[in-house]
């Protein structure tokens, strides 16, 4: 018989396990509550991961996922060596980085302006109105862009014609399409991105501003030396999140806005995957490209997080 | 919002306020113009503010059975979608917010992983196809029913609620479901409204997934029909006013834009005050 006060290691482990099980059993209601959600994650998030093996296979629908022949990295090399690889990567990275670099400053400036405004009602109204477009779908924004940019009746082209210039079809002109993509994204999302920066500004202790005021700092100096450093963590965080999605480039937006004449400048990885996979039934090739995109995204976010932790002292997770 | 006392520098104040008004105009001008065009009588030239106002375009659209059916589909998908998503999200977030639940770290990690890495469009499409959900509304309701972001925001909100309330209810003999229903959810109104709004917006705006998973044009929700009207594609189905060969006139297109936006605009003022606080109090901290 084991000594109750000095149990053997195996017995201690057994009782610990028993206690764990007891604790789990006491929470059986909670596990039951979790069940539907977990089933959903297994079916709609983990089953696709299992399906992703067709990236390394020559998927034949008749043979099924499991019995289609393996082709190793064939689908990947086919993509890397194809002529559209450079074009897709250029378009994707160009649009993504342009949105990040051109889109971030307006959001920061807007947040600072709302924070600095002495007219509380004007500031609140601007805030409410500017994050409204975030909730409009890209189809609706497409309609708005048609109203503004249509070559025959669009407001912008009417303005151009009034000044004696030729009308421009912005949505089908390869030289201008990317600008439409970038600036419509800024119109839609600036107010929404500003929310996080504004929250950071509100979190800054008012005593800092008061102390600076006593020391005779101007408004500009207060923005430079208190507001901007106070937002730095959030700016780093937002940039990190966007870097993790650098290969996304805004699929829905481009899918709605683009058309055959501008494929050469607008086609990004996601739109190509959709056309090759769903429309041309190239399931394996499209999956390989999608997987490549997912892996780069994961890599970006892990590396960016490391860098942020080391140099900004704060990461995403 | 707390305001910091700011003395002097009237020029600075003026430029800040001028900047805000400029931003306001840039945001509102396109929206105002869309409404103007929709109110311009058919056949007249659009101006920034219409010279004569006519509701003909709206009357014309509301006569179209295809458009009304799409509106009904969108309302149905949004209502059922939000209910389903909220049910799954709350039921997953609440147990994971309980610090004493064994295995909670592992399960949260498993969910977080799907946020950082996913297999892409085609493998998910194959799942939906293999479950025989293609050409049913289940495909639209289920494929994105849970958003990891919303789930984590909600979990963090639950975690920040005072634990003593739940303990008190437990001592009084309440079970987990009763604690959730009577204590936690009533305290979580801001986050429930915020997350509910996010799910509603996603369903209401969804136009790519219907095209991906549905083939019958009679099943399509409003955004897909709006796209068709805007591009003049299949427009004969929606606009019969002598427009069988040409694209519908601008006023009709913009009336369709306004009609699709309207339900969102009606709900927005009621909920928008919650979502700033809701989103911020949740935050993403994993």
Image: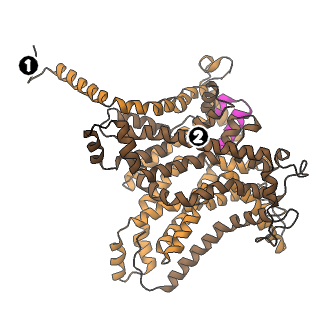
Given the image, what chain letter belongs to the residue carrying mark 1? A
> Within the magenta stretch, is there residue B37?
no
Given the image, what chain letter belongs to the residue carrying mark 2? B
Name which residue lies at 76% across and 58% down. B254
Region of the chain picked out in magenta, as a range: A268-286
What is the total number of numbered labels drawn onto the structure image? 2
B5 to the left or right of B174: right
Can residue A56 be seen here?
yes
Residue position for label 1: A3
> What hue does chain B carry in this figure?
brown
Secondary structure of residue under mark 2: helix
Q: Nearer the viewer, residue A162 or A225?
A: A162
Q: Nearer the viewer, residue A210 or A135?
A: A135
B242 to the left or right of A303: right
A208 to the left or right of A114: left
Q: Residue B80 bears which disc, if any?
A: 2
Name the spot of residue A2 as percent of width and height, x first. 10, 16
Name which residue lies at 57% across and 73% down. B20
B261 to the left or right of A171: left
Name the spot of residue A176 as percent of width and height, x first. 74, 59
Name which residue lies at 66% across and 57% down. B262
Question: Chain coloured orange: which letter?
Answer: A
Marks 1 and 2, how far apart at CA = 60 Å
Quarter of the image where the N terminus of chain A is located = top left
Q: Nearer the viewer, residue B73 or B1?
A: B73
Check contact, mark 1 vs mark 2: CB within 8 A: no
Badge 2: how crowded within 10 Å, few (<14), some, or many (20+)? some
Secondary structure of residue under mark 1: loop
Location of residue A99 with respect to A264 vertically, above or below: below
Q: Is most of the magenta stretch helix, strand or loop?
A: helix
């Amino acid at each position: 018989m084991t000594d109750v006060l000095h149990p053997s290691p195996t017995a201690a482990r057994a009782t610990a396990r028993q206690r764990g099980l007891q604790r789990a059993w006491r929470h059986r209601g909670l596990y039951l509550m979790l069940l539907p959600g977990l089933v959903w994650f297994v079916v709609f998030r983990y089953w696709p991961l299992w399906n992703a093996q067709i990236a390394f296979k020559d998927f034949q629908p008749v043979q099924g996922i499991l019995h289609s022949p393996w082709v190793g990295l064939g689908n990947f090399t086919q993509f890397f060596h194809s002529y559209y690889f450079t074009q897709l990567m250029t378009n994707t990275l160009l649009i993504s980085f342009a949105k990040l670099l051109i889109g971030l400053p307006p959001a920061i400036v807007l947040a600072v302006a709302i924070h600095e405004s002495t007219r509380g009602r004007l500031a609140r109204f601007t805030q409410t109105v500017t994050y409204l477009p975030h909730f409009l779908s890209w189809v609706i924004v497409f309609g708005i862009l048609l109203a503004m940019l249509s070559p025959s009746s669009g407001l912008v082209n009417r303005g151009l014609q009034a000044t004696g210039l030729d009308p421009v079809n912005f949505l089908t002109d390869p030289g201008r399409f990317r600008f439409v993509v970038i600036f419509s994204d800024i119109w839609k999302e600036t107010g929404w991105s500003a929310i996080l920066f504004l929250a950071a500004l509100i979190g800054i202790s008012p005593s800092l501003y008061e102390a600076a005021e006593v020391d005779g700092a101007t408004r500009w100096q207060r923005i430079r030396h208190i507001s901007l450093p106070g937002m730095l963590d959030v700016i780093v965080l937002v940039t990190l999140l966007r870097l993790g999605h650098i290969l996304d480039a805004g699929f829905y937006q481009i899918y709605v806005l683009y058309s055959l004449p501008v494929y050469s400048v607008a086609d990004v990885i996601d739109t190509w995957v959709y056309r090759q996979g769903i429309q041309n039934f190239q399931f394996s090739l499209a999956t390989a490209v999608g997987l490549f995109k997912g892996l780069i995204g994961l890599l970006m976010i892990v590396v960016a997080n490391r860098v942020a932790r080391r140099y900004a002292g704060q990461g995403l997770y | 919002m707390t305001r910091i006392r700011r003395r002097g520098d009237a020029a600075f104040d003026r430029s800040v306020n001028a900047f805000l008004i400029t931003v306001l105009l840039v945001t509102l001008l396109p929206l105002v113009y869309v409404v103007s065009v929709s109110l311009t009588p058919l056949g007249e030239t659009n101006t920034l503010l219409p010279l004569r106002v006519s509701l003909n375009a709206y009357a014309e659209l509301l006569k179209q059975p295809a458009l009304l059916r799409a509106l009904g589909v969108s309302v149905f998908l949004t209502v059922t979608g939000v209910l389903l998503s909220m049910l799954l999200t709350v039921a997953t977030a609440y147990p994971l917010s309980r610090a004493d639940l064994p295995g909670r770290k592992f399960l949260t990690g498993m969910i977080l992983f799907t946020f950082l890495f996913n297999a892409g469009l085609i493998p998910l499409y194959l799942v939906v196809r293999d479950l025989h959900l293609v050409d049913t509304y289940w495909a639209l309701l289920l494929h994105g029913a849970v958003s990891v972001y919303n789930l984590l925001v909600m979990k963090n909100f639950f975690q920040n609620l005072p634990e003593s309330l739940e303990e008190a209810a437990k001592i009084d003999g309440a079970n987990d479901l009763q604690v959730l229903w009577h204590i936690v959810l009533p305290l979580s109104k801001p986050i429930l409204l915020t997350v509910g709004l996010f799910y509603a917006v996603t369903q209401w705006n969804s136009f790519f997934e219907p095209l991906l998973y549905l083939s019958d044009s009679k099943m399509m929700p409003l955004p897909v029909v709006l796209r068709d009207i805007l591009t003049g594609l299949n427009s004969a189905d929606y606009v019969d006013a002598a427009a069988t060969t040409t694209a519908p006139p601008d006023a009709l297109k913009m009336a369709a834009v306004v009609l699709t936006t309207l339900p969102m605009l009606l709900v927005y003022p009621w909920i928008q005050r919650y979502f700033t606080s809701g989103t911020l109090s949740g935050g993403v901290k994993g």
